[in-house]
Image: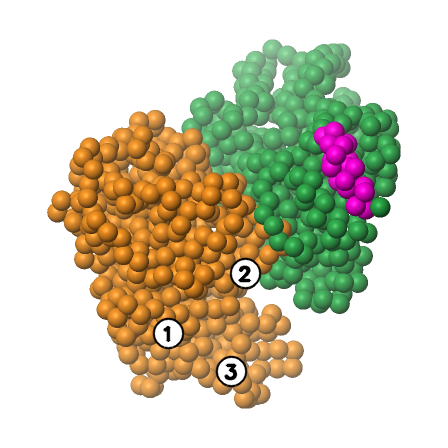
Chain colours: A green, B orange
Amino acid sequence: MKIICTICTFLFGVVVLLFFGWAYPHHLHYQEQYQLFLFDSTYVWEIIKQPGGVADLLGRFCTQFFLYAWVGAFIIALLLSMVQLLLLRLVKDGWFYGLSFVPSFLLWIFLLDENALLSGVWAVLLTLLITWVIFRWSKGWVRYVLLIVAIPLLYFLVGPVCLPIPVDSLWHGIHYYRYPADFPWFLWAASLSVFAIAGTFLFFHRAYHRTVPSMVLSSAIVATGMGIFVWKNSNFKAEKVMQYDFMARYQQWNRILETINDEKPNNQIGVTVQNLALAKHGMLLDHMFEYNQNGILGLLPDVGTDAISPLPTSEAFYQLGMITIAQRTVFEAQEAILDFQKSGRCYKRLAQTNLILGSYEVARKYLKALQKTLFYREWASETLPLLGNEEAIAKHPEYGRLRQMLYTDDFYFGDHVGPEMLERLYFRNTENRMAYQYLVAYYLLTGDRESLNHFISVTR
Amino acid sequence: MKKVLYIIIGTWCWLLTSCSSSPENAKQESELPQIYPDYLGVTIPVNIAPLCFNMADENALRIDAVITDSHGNSLHSQGDESVDFDLDDWHTLLAQNLGDSLHVTVSAKYDDGWHTYQSFPIYVSQDSIDYGICYRLIAPGHEVWSKMGIYERDLSSFEERPLIENTQFEGCVNCHSFNRGNPAEMSLHIRGPHGATLLRHSDGSVTAYNTKTSQTLGLCVYPYWHPSGRYIAYSTNNTNQVFHSADHNRIEVFDSASDLQIYDVEKNELLLSPLLKQDSIYETYPVFSADGRSLYFCAARAIPEGSLQLDSIHYNLCRIDFNPETGNFGNRIDTIVNAESQHKSVSFPRPSYDGRFLCYTLSNYGQFSIWHHEADLWLLDLSSGQSRSMTEANSDDTESFHNWSTASRWLVFSSRRDDGLYTRPYFCHVDDKGMATKPFMLPQRNPRRFYRDRFLSFNVPEFIIRPTRFDGHKASRIINDKSRKVFGVRKEPTQ
């Protein structure tokens, strides 16, 4: 009997692992890039002093590992399996065995949303853990007293998940979801299901007996039903967009070309990244019309005021050598993160742009913060000695090259990058072939033959 | 049991003494210490929080400081990163040395042992400073904002409290203003879907206003209270923003149109004057004189619509009469500082409350000087009409917004001298002859850690004479409620 339980939980964990690691990895990368976990006492205190702060802290701590999707998938699989196992400790009878998977499935569905935060899963897990400890070590009226005492304590530690009443004021300000105004219904459903299943079992537990067929059958029904629900709620379109953003972030130009050859992107971010990769390979002008284009919005979109679309665009600005524009775009994107968190990706890029522009003290500020992280620390420590070292920067393969492309003539720009900006960029350094490709592509996409002919005649 | 207690107490005492032992066998250095923030030779008010500091370089393993006075008193602190003086002992020492100087001897421990530097003075002014300052904390961004809010800080301790934060409503908050530092009369702007101007009246009530009228350009901004509390001067500005491609200054914020008006709090009506809403002139940053009978403001010749010749916008400091009894304006505008003739531009005029001086920011062009690295503070002597650069307070980087303490002896100002981007508040003493002292940065317990970890600018520091006791929850309920009282406009044209 125990072996069957172990196998079922293990299988569930493996499926979750494979789903997030193989089918949904870029959702995890996406989560990681919109937070910055600092090993810093002030940072920790600012989080845990809020209601739900302990769950939030644990969620943020785990999310930093999402930089590596398989590690993130393993963490999620482990947490969801633990939720199921803890509920199983409270609910042991046959038909209830299958139901013990329901909260984990609901949490899985919750996590399919890119704005759902891992703190919600930790909140359910910690609620179950403390409830189990109370049930394990107490009896009679002591148990009830402990449960009553545990509710306010749990509310402070993990938030309203411990008492799933859908009253907005109770949930408002608890960091379960990136949109503060939205109610996390699936998380609420998961916590409610824990209470419903455990409560029903405790009420009817004498009526049922554990049998292998009832366990297997109930598990199969729940797995099938909830599995379909998981699949239906998965957003693979968003996953694809996130993949393009991820590949641009890590400058995987070859992989981008392979991906666009498999399936031509038809969304703005995908097209922007596609054109960037083509330009990096010097193929933009010869091959751009073999793929979907979205006018100039697919080349260099206007800078938006959200946290998502500006990031891949800023990669294009950065690679082109438009460093001030890249800097502004990344700064705004970070400011637009809905739950006011900071971003390791943005801090890193802001450190780079400030370094290239010679704002060393500002760059130092970002680098010092990154030194308090787990995965950006090494890079930050390697970069710090470059500050103020003009010779080393000039020799640096990336920063030295980009410095050679910086605008030297000052002009004003706004949200829209026009051809005159690309032209100035190209004439600043005619070895900047990306600027050449982007400018010609711009004329081709807008059908401005006159300007194109003029530019070609000038550059001949 | 007693033995255990003695052991614990003994160990604790040993730990205390071992942690705070004075530097031994220190190498005597001939130079002054390099500390952060630079507090060497600064003048401070008697009621300021302890000037804790770090070694400027980050190689120091420990730092030790001893402050002595001429009466034989001393104060000692030692720490890994910073010295952190006891709050009560610090205030006692300062009170004992009013108008006198203190001497600070700094030692730092490096890999090769302790080094003791030449001692430096700190002067304790006889002029105390107001209770605190109020400021907005916001990232120095462009269009989008993350978490931000209005905060108050007790200057005699390290306590900072939020008045209101944008987690309490959707939007942003700015333009906090008090009548001569009195938080009973307060103005606050909310921007975004719940936009409003909040006015706190002397009876404690808070009202949300819609300040946009059919006869004005838009919402009222840049408030300044009349000393009587009856009027508030505002400007309305069509503000735009562009970015530099290759300039030390990153951003230009500029007006494509702007006018001035005065709001009569008692009658709920705006007082307009054709002289202050000329299409060919950009008028902005209105402030009342100390006696309330003049309105100072900045004015520049407008550039053609759509033009981006921003470096040709030069604001002068101007003045118009104002009669507080009738609410009427004078019929002529005087130019007090002709910055245009020097190809410079004036922003943020702030008269001292004793009527002696007017401090303003001078930059190369435009009116949004916080993004101009060349911007400096200037002081106009209102009795002689002479202006001079406040070189004692200025730095190579931006000095911008500033305000006087209610006794007109201290100036708080924003500066980007620390890292070139993040604005910090600095304070300097200004004597009755207009001479300023070396400024000091707002004290923190561990300044380097505090300022490095805080990715926010201190925006618009304003003195306050006591805690604001602003009920942010009540204010957010008012903000989130849709009802707004609409500004009226006085019907007959005022002259």
Q: From this viewpoint, is residue A237 visible?
A: yes
What amino acid type should be assigned to the residue bearing mark 2? Gly
**Figure quadrant of residue B149:** top left
User: In the image, which is nearer the foreground, mark 2 or mark 3?
Assistant: 2
Residue B247: x and y in percent read: 60, 56
Residue drawn 75% across and 57% down? A404
Instruction: Specify the amino acid type for callout 1.
Output: Thr
Going from N to C along the chain, the mark reached first, 1 or 3, is 3
Residue linked to disc 3: B32
Image position of B393 (left or right of A1): left
Examine the residues drawn in magenta and state their main secondary structure.
helix
Near mark 1 (Cα within 10 A), the count class, few <14, some 14-19 or many ≥20, is many
Q: CA distance from mark 1 to mark 3?
A: 19 Å
Q: CA distance from mark 2 to mark 1?
A: 22 Å
Determine the residue located farthest toward the left in the rendered image.
B325
Label 3 resides on the chain identified as B
Whether B430 is drawn above or below A439: the answer is below
Q: Which mark is residue B420?
A: 2
The magenta stretch spans which residues? Answer: A438-459
Which residue is identified by label 1? B437
Q: Nearer the viewer, residue A73 or A392?
A: A392
* Residue A272, magenta (yes or no): no
| The quarter of the displayed image where residue A364 is located | bottom right
Amino acid, disc 3: Leu
Is there any visible trace of residue A209 in the rendered image? no
Q: Chain of mark 2?
A: B
Vertical relation: B477 (above or below) A214: below
Query: What's the residue at 61%, 30% (across, down)?
Result: A116
The mark that comes first in sequence, 2 or 3, is: 3
